[in-house]
Amino acid sequence: MKSVCIRSIARLAALRLGGKWAKERSMAQDVRFIVVNADDGLRSELRAVLLSVSGVKIVAEVDEPALLERAVKQFQVNAVLLNLDPSPQAVLPVVAEVVAASENLTFIATSESTDGKLILESIRLGIKEFLPKPIEAKALSETIERINSTRVTTMPMGKLISVMGASGGVGASMLATNLAAELAGLAEGRVTIVDLDYRFGQVATLLDVTPKYTVADLCQSPEALEAQVVERALVKHGSGLQVLSRPSSLAQAETITAASCVGMLSSLLQFNDYVVVDGPTRFDLHALPVLDLSDSHFLLVQQLVPTVRNAQRILDDLSGNGYGPERMNLICNRVGRNASVLSVADVASTLDLSAFATIPDDWQTVSAAINLGETLQQHGPKTKVREAIQEIAKRLHSPVSETDDKGTQKKGLIGRIFASS
């Protein structure tokens, strides 16, 4: 039997979140998909068209139709996309029982064939939608609207925010820890930061906390994590932020798989408004599942040629895996008059991305905070570098732009910095 090709683990049953913000978020929920596809050559195309629709999450991919039953039982999803090719008559009988037993799921079939008999047979089995290849984003979007109009409403889970540095030393850990601390001050519920640098991560050091349990401990179980287990594993920082540290030994780092990592993140999302991850630190198969789950992903660069080249390689590989540039938010760190001969505009133009934000250069403040194990809230609350990260947090928490009396969008600190660079 073929192995399951799981790019990411399902988000699990949602915990009820209290407060006004949770109620507002219930109005717009993600549609979570399992993709059944045995064609490796089609994987990036299917991912690209699914992720082009706002609010879609690919929570798992299986490369064997016979494994769909197991996947549906394991993962909480709203819809299943079935690639019937190259042999629809071989796929349909295998999935028939699963379709019949899954009343709360919408099954969508896709095939190069538009034969009326095939479409009729699919409908009779309980497959509600049939999309001919190539799948058009508009047709898929309309299908997802129909799914949303009929499905039972459940409370959504927290948002996953990932921070990836284009190279070592660009400041990704600094940004992740301080961004998480700022979000902890804004959110009504919990915020947790997770260190995904399994070998040399420094999140616990930057926050001056001593963990008893680590990522490795929560990744041991493939099942849903109980609230008590999660509570015991996390260390609370003075800002209210919860911290999950990297493994305590290098040997433990080797035991963490991509699937177990994303399963752990999925469980954490039940109990948090935000989960911020420092990573992925390497762009490999471990990175793709995290990107699949992420609601916001930040790529951090400095105005240095090697860093920009690395960023371009990451973006090229993302594109090859079906991730459009709209899923990546560019942030330039250590921006200042003497920072580089490259301007922010040069970097953005080279990468063909707009800069989501810039962070000013203040190495004296940042390095002192790092060495003391303090956040910028603690060490430099009035500094421009702290204010820039604070505004990033505000934009994530309240994405609707403010306007002035004339209806003109106001520019925040980030906008002012970017405009002057």
Image (spheres, helix red, strand yellow):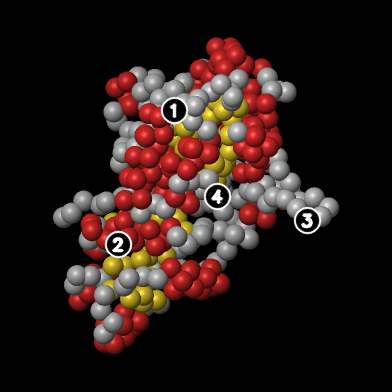
Give the residue number, with chain letter if any, for mark 4.
157
Instruction: Kindly identify which residue carries mark 1.
Output: 304
Q: Secondary structure at mark 3?
A: loop
Label 2 belongs to which residue?
36
The foreground one among 49 and 80 is 49
Q: Is residue 14 visible?
A: yes
Q: Nearer the viewer, residue 384 or 18?
A: 384
Residue 267 appears in view: no
Tag 1's secondary structure? loop
Of the residues shown, which amino acid type is indicated by label 3? Gly
Give the residue furthest to the left: 1
Point out the frontmost of discs 4 and 2: 2
Provide residue 360's location: percent of width, then percent of height.
60, 27
Q: Earlier in the sequence, mark 1 or mark 4?
A: 4
> What is the crowding at mark 3: few (fewer than 14 residues within 10 Å), some, or many (at least 20)?
few
Q: CA distance from mark 4 to mark 2?
A: 24 Å
Label 4 Cα crowd, 10 Å radius (few <14 / some 14-19 / many 20+): many
Q: Looking at numbered disc 2 in the image, what kind of residue is underneath it?
A: Val
- Cβ atoms under marks 4 and 2 closer than 8 Å: no
Please state which amino acid type lies under the numbered disc 1: Leu
Q: How far apart are the alpha carbons under marks 1 and 3?
A: 38 Å
- Please tell me whether residue 11 is drawn above or below residue 194 in the rendered image: below
- Where in the figure is residue 363, as x and y percent of width and height? 57, 17
Camera-near label (1 vs 4) is: 1
The mark lying in front, picked from 1 and 2, is 1
Residue depicted at x 52% and y 33%: 343
> Which tag is nearer the camera, tag 2 or tag 3?
3
On the image, numbered disc 3 is attached to which residue?
407
Q: Mark 1–mark 3 contact, CB under 8 Å?
A: no
Q: Amino acid at mark 4?
A: Met
Looking at the image, the residue that sits furthest to the right is: 405
